[in-house]
Image (tube, grey):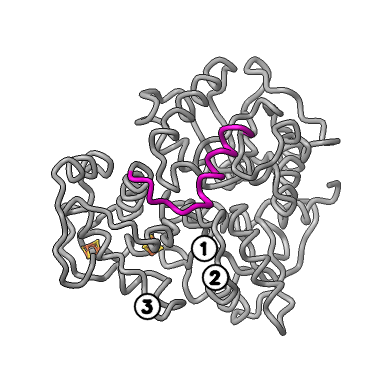
Amino acid sequence: MPGHEAVFIDDELWERLIELTSGAATVCYQCGVCTATCPWGEIKQEPLSVRKFMRQAQLGFQDGNESLWLCTTCAQCEAYCPRGVNISDVFRGLRTIAWEQRTTLVGLSSLLWSVYWNNNPWTQPPSQRSGWAKGLDIPAFNPQEHEILLYSGCTASYDRRAQSIARALVVLLQSAGVRFGYLGEDEPCCGEAVLSVGHKPYFLEIAQYTSKLFQERGVTDLVTISPHCYDVFKNHYPASTGSNNIRPHHYTRYLQGLIEDGRLVFDGHFDAQVTFQDPCYLGRHNGEYQAPRKILATIPGVELVEMENHGLEALCCGGGGGRMWLETPAGERFSDLRVEQAAQTRAGYLVTACPFCAVCMEDSAKMKKGTSLQVLDVAEIATLALKNK
Ligand code: SF4
Ligand code: SF4
């Protein structure tokens, strides 16, 4: 909102924003706690004025300010907002308006085109989607035979670092004797990247297509690697598709169940001090703080030491809200802050349960001088405690 300049309030836009955000910002009383708690304030000289964007949503205008795209939808501010405003949803709504007014950032169009042409936001060929699973002997999903569908998602399918997480999870499921299948090259993109940059109309199309495909293939229970895929299936598909035909599980909760049922047993050990990064879309967005910690507590030899900010207060890695596809200069990355906190615990491993977190934090750990901190996913560290992996 420009300082003291007059702004044009458009009733139609106001109504559209109310519709897009379910009126989330209407209860905001402009206290500014969100601006004060947003991690951008620790990185940029001028903090992200979250309060200002909430005001725009209340009044019904969008000024094309580039900082609209800084929000990672990490929900840290939401944890402190005294009015319980769904700030992530307000940002997504304002971004939808930006698409409609053609005031988005240039690079974001290629993300949408890649999902359209390639079925993934990583501009990778659809024919390579199942390349990560080569040699793992995963059968095609068959609802008559399989307990679950393994949904690898775009990042674990294509990103070389994240592929290792998918492979580790397969080893764990096989070790526990789980009957599971995979859709291979037919696996559809869940659309989370599209939703996070605010293109709600295209996300709606993707959700309807994907939901229909799952129905045709007889999918009910599916296990995701990324908390972002889990979140859209759980929290955005029912309203977007008008159907509740799938039961998504994040793999950490699923593995916890396998451990409790005595199906997944660690017959080896991995002696290490570790610290845990709560992914925003597992923790704050879905309230799951315990499952990854319970898995770590079961692995013989693993000792967990918590970082200064953990659980509800955990710092974001910086990869959500579409930021994975936007350039963030070195020195302005949330993951740098997080790696610094992890190093202060003196743990040897920074463990997480999200491909975005693993990718962002590994980059920051490599750049940080004077640390031997290694980044692993819960699935990866769990396989290290299996003798026959
Ligand atoms: S913390 Fe909540 S009530 Fe306060 S300005 Fe932000 S959104 Fe509004
Ligand atoms: S969701 Fe996260 S990045 Fe976005 S405004 Fe809130 S604290 Fe800042």
Q: Mark 3 points at which residue?
A: 46
Between 96 and 290, the one lying in front of the other is 96
Mark 2 lies on a secondary structure that is: loop
The image position of residue 127, as x and y in percent, is 74, 31
Q: Which of marks 3 and 1 is nearer the N terminus?
A: 3
Q: Which residue is drawn at 18% across and 66% down?
A: 30
The answer to whether marks 2 and 3 mark residues whose Cβ atoms lie closer than 8 Å is no
Amino acid at circle 3: Glu
Q: What's the residue at 44%, 33% (across, down)?
A: 202
Callout 2–callout 1 Cβ contact below 8 Å: yes
> Which segment did they paint magenta?
101-118
Residue 50 at x, y percent in the picture: 30, 65
- Judged by depth in the image, the label closer to the viewer, 2 or 3, is 3
Q: Residues within 10 Å of mark 1 (few under 14, many from 20)?
A: many
Secondary structure type for disc 1: loop
Task: Farthest residue to the bottom: give it.
Answer: 370
Question: Does the beta carbon of the residue at mark 2 sit less than 8 Å from ligand 2?
Answer: no
Rendered image: mark on residue 276: none
The question of residue 231 being in magenta is answered with no
The residue singled out by tag 1 in the image is 318
Please tell me whether the stretch drawn in magenta is mainly helix, strand or loop.
helix
Relative to 361, say whether 325 is above or below: above
| Callout 3 secondary element | loop
Indicate the amino acid at tag 1.
Answer: Gly
Q: How many labels does the image show?
A: 3
User: Cβ(mark 1) to ligand 2 < 8 Å?
Assistant: no
Query: In terms of image quarters, where does ligand 1 lie?
Result: bottom left
Left or right of 191? Residue 240 is left
> Residue 333's mark?
2
Residue type, numbered disc 2:
Arg
| Quarter of the rendering occupied by the N terminus | bottom left
